[in-house]
Image (cartoon, helix red, strand yellow):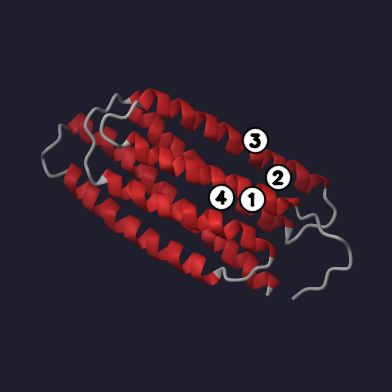
Amino acid sequence: MRLRLTPQDSSFYEMFAALADNLVKAADLVAEVFASGADRESLASRMRDLEHACDASTHQIMRHLNSTFVTPFDREDIYDLAGRLDDVMDFMEAAVDLVVLYSVEELPREIASQAEVLQRMAQLTASAMPRLKTMKDLSEYWIEVNRLENEADRVYRRLVARLFNGDYEALTVLKLKDIVDQLEFAADAFEKVANSVETVAVKES
């Protein structure tokens, strides 16, 4: 454990927690969008609001980082973690936006499984952020996120196989593939967040 002789600014922990809480809300919206009878236009608008809030939180972290002399952990790791949390939001928002832009009416039922995995990853991430302050009990978080990312990969492969089995017209396949790709990117981005947390924990141990 490294010794610090000057006070640290603990507000970074609160800002990371706020970012992660928005990811939970976003993942829940993703699940709603893919539910039967959803008002997708309204949900997409709410998702854009969340994405803007996430951008604002990320910029707040960056501004605070530039004006803070002593940080709770390495500056480059704070920058990296904030950026990766923001990436997750961007991918989820893109998936929801594409559903509306492409006017997709019928979605493969397997997409609900993708959304469920993202919800679980978001919840784990949100529960992990406050623990950055003590760096305790974090290993289970990144191990489980890694397992869920593997599960997301399996769901994604089944989805792609379904899209190309001849049940859909070619243009519909392209639209749906674009949407499920964004959801897969979001799952990958959650794993990168977990990797960043693991890096910080190892450095601080």
Q: Which of marks 2 and 1 is in front?
A: 1
- Residue 82 shows up from this direction: no
Residue drawn at x 38%, y 44% is 183
The residue singled out by tag 3 in the image is: 56
Residue holding disc 1? 16
Is residue 158 positioned above or below 37 on the image?
Answer: below
- The answer to whether any part of residue 52 appears in the image is yes
In the drawing, does residue 202 fall left or right of residue 158? right
Instruction: Check contact, mark 4 vs mark 2: CB within 8 A.
Output: no
Q: Distance between the residues labelled 1 and 3?
A: 12 Å
Please state which amino acid type lies under the numbered disc 1: Phe
Q: How far apart are marks 2 and 3 (CA)?
A: 9 Å
Give the side of residue 35 with respect to residue 121, left or right: left
**Distance between mark 1 and mark 4 Cα atoms:** 11 Å
> Which residue position is annotated with label 2?
61
Q: Tell me which label, 2 or 3, sits earlier in the chain.
A: 3
Label 3 secondary element: helix
